[in-house]
Amino acid sequence: MVTLLAICSHNSYSETMTKTTPTKNEIQRFRYDTNSWNQLADAAPGGNRSAVLKQLIDWYIGRPGAALPERPARAGERAPTMEIDGIPLPQVREILRWWRKQPST
């Protein structure tokens, strides 16, 4: 890991910050408003924000096999359901995985 030390001055306010170049699986940080961050913890399965973010990022960058995380229902609404001919989408994905493994005839 490479560590750089920077002194920032803005409107007569100075602070010392460290900027690191991340390595594989190192903690990444970003800014997000506290209220939304807490809502994500409440909505994420088991409060695991990290798992939801990883799944979203994997889908966004086009990682093979990645899928969007399921969005929970908001208060007063039903959970969104995705179906193909009445079959829930996760079950359709399982069927497709099985189909792709079948030898071609």
Image (cartoon, rainbow, N blue to C red):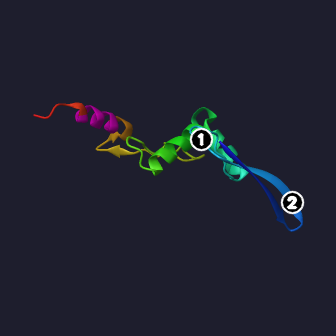
Assign the N terminus to one quadrant of the image.
top right
Kindly identify which residue carries mark 2: 14
Q: Position of residue 10 (x, y in %)?
A: 83, 66
- Tag 1 or tag 2, which sits nearer the N-term? 2
Distance between the Cα atoms at labels 2 and 1? 28 Å
Q: Position of residue 31 (x, y in %)?
A: 69, 53
Residue 93 belongs to the span the image colors magenta? yes
Answer with left or right where residue 100 lies relative to residue 65. Answer: left
Query: What span is in magenta?
Result: 92-100
Answer with left or right where residue 32 lies relative to residue 91. Answer: right
Q: Position of residue 50 (x, y in %)?
A: 60, 39
Q: Disc 1 residue type?
A: Thr
Circle 1 SS class: loop
Residue 49 has which mark? none
Kindly identify which residue carries mark 1: 23
Q: Disc 2 residue type?
A: Ser
